[in-house]
Image: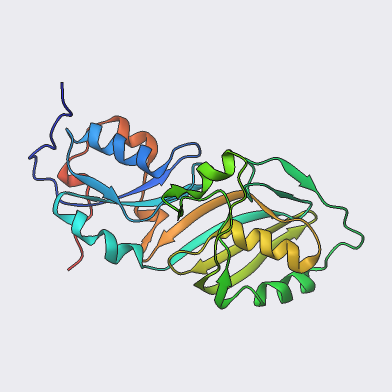
Amino acid sequence: MGRKPYSHSNLNGLLVVDKPIGWSSMDVIRRIRNATDRCKAGHAGTLDPLATGIVVCCLGKATKLVDSLMIQHKVYETRVDLSAFTQTDDLEGTREEVTVQTLPSPEQITQALKQLTGNIEQIPPAYCAIHINGQRAYKLARKGEIVEIDPRTVTVHSIELSAYQWPFADLKINCGKGTYIRSIARDLGKLLNTGGHCASLRRTAVGDYTLEKAIPGSRLEQPITQDDLIAMPV
């Protein structure tokens, strides 16, 4: 039997989901399709499985808004572990311990973060979904191949050091499309002569869509109706 066609249920609008840890962004979409009798749906920006928080999902006619929503600014809260690097720049990879002779001060971290703010050249993590010669970078990395990705210009509007107790630095980051928070964690460690990887990551906003407008992932275990959706922006 072939794939069940999309439903003609006339659901149109946005659904903001607070993605739990362990789900991919496509896991969210699959659950939405099941909860809406296979309504056409897509998401406006990938969130790593180890990250939690906002995934803006577009249903029905709202799928035409995916590209415009993807360019909206995003806000993240991340805890950076400065005691080690990892292959994946997050907790999924093997730790590469770093011997730190002198612990950085809050002032030194703040100064380093200034170098990672603005229009910056950023090298994405080796374990990412970028295509290299027709293959995803993470698939090549998992095969043990050396992955070389060219730097990309991204915009980081602001980074705030919200808490610090060695080895953890808690950051709040407001950034533009295509910014890798894992790369910021890695590059912060390089600037400080420490390690650096994301110990946790949470997306708290995409444009005007915040956690206050989100439903928990568990809500997708029940049917979704038009009353659950946010109207399409004009």
Extreme-right residue of the structure: 101
The location of residue 130, given as percent across then percent down, is 46, 54
Give the residue at the far front of this rendering.
Answer: 133
Q: What residue is rendered at 61% in x and 48% in y?
A: 200
Query: Is 155 displayed left or right of 27 in the figure?
Result: right
Q: What residue do we see at 48% from left, 55% from top?
A: 203
Give the number of marks. Answer: 0
Q: Is 36 on the left-hand or right-hand side of 210? A: left
Question: Would residue 166 appear left or right of 79 to someone viewing this image?
Answer: right
Front one among 139 and 84: 139
- The quarter of the picture where residue 122 lies is bottom right
Residue at the image point whose x is 38% and y is 51% from the top: 55
Classify residue 22 as left or right of residue 92: left
In the image, what residue occupies the spot 11% across and 37% down? 7
On the rendered image, what quadrant is the N terminus found in?
top left
Q: Is residue 166 visible?
A: yes
**Where residue 11 sits in the image (x, y, percent)?**
13, 46
Q: Nearer the viewer, residue 102 or 140?
A: 140
Place of residue 113 in the rendered image (x, y in percent of width and height, measured from the top left): 67, 72
The colour scheme of the drawn protein is rainbow
Q: Is residue 231 visible?
A: no
Indicate whether 113 appears above or below 133: below
Q: Nearer the viewer, residue 133 or 216?
A: 133
Where 104 sits versus 38, above or below? below
**Which quadrant, please, contains the C terminus?**
bottom left
Q: Quadrant of residue 118?
A: bottom right
Give coordinates of residue 199: x percent, y percent.
65, 48
User: Depth check: 136 or 201 in front?
Assistant: 136
Specify the quadrant of the image occupied by residue 6. top left
